[in-house]
Image: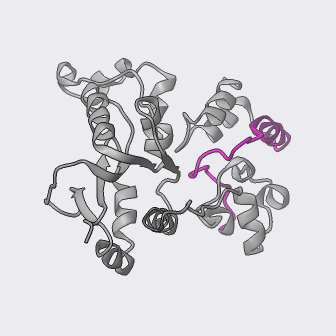
Amino acid sequence: MSALPKLAVWKFASCDGCQLSLLDLEDHLLALAGKVTIAYFLEASSTVLPGPYDVSLVEGSITTPEDAHRIKQVRRQSRLVATIGACATAGGIQALRNFTDVRDYIPVVYAHPEYIKTLDKSTPISDHIPVDFQLPGCPINKNQLLEFIKALLQGRTPRLADESVCLACKIKGNICVMVAEGVPCLGPVTHAGCGALCPTYHRGCYGCYGPKEAANTASLSARCRHLGLSDQDIVRLFRTFNAYAEPFRQESLAHE
């Protein structure tokens, strides 16, 4: 009988929310544990098995020289690498530092800044190593993660939603908050995955799942101007959980 596939879960600069989404699978996680060997997952267990690993799930962005070195070690030990969450796929909320000089803030935050070793920017994992799959979200959708792992075990391509949040709103029967209430919303340019959570409660989408492919951010900005938003407002709109994702980054820079 062949050995079970070995799964590793790694943390870099992040809040651990995406790892908690994996633990939140609850009963599904118990079934999954019978299909794979969880070889490295410090959020859940102190057990550490040596590589190589069949699949590595990576949460978090790269912010320190040590992490830039460590992620290369993860890549060398892993057959497949999947980044999970906005930090790993786009640099995360901490990538807001990329629009300024982080050295201006270190003395304000830390009593002994001389002990702090950090990179100038917070960058996604794909800036440092080849990545095989990316699961966006802040945090990731646990059902999408389950589908991803099941697909790998079954030797098929994962069936993951690729529509925008707008379609999710249509499916739920939501009235468009931007059209009906004049609320700025990133839904038209954001990847679905949350079930249109914020628009369901009459709030604009914050872009937690990152930019959809071919996102027409310029058109959305023009609409926001029509709603009365200033350039500064538009910059703030695009600079949230996925601020350094290319389409959002470029659109915010266009309004500085």
Q: Nearer the viewer, residue 253 or 189?
A: 189
Is residue 112 depicted above or below 159 in this figure? above
Q: Nearer the viewer, residue 35 or 11?
A: 35
Q: Nearer the viewer, residue 179 or 76?
A: 76
Q: Residue at x 56, y 51 (%)?
A: 208
Span colored in magenta: 201-227
Query: Residue pushed farthest front?
Result: 1
Q: Residue at x 77, y 74 (%)?
A: 173
Q: Residue at x 46, y 57 (%)?
A: 139
Is residue 211 depicted above or below 195 in this figure? above
Q: Nearer the viewer, residue 137 or 144?
A: 144
Confirm whether the magenta stretch covers residue 213.
yes
Q: Is residue 43 visible?
A: no
Is residue 119 depicted above or below 45 in this figure? above
Q: Is residue 35 left or right of residue 247?
A: left
Q: Is residue 241 left or right of residue 149?
A: right
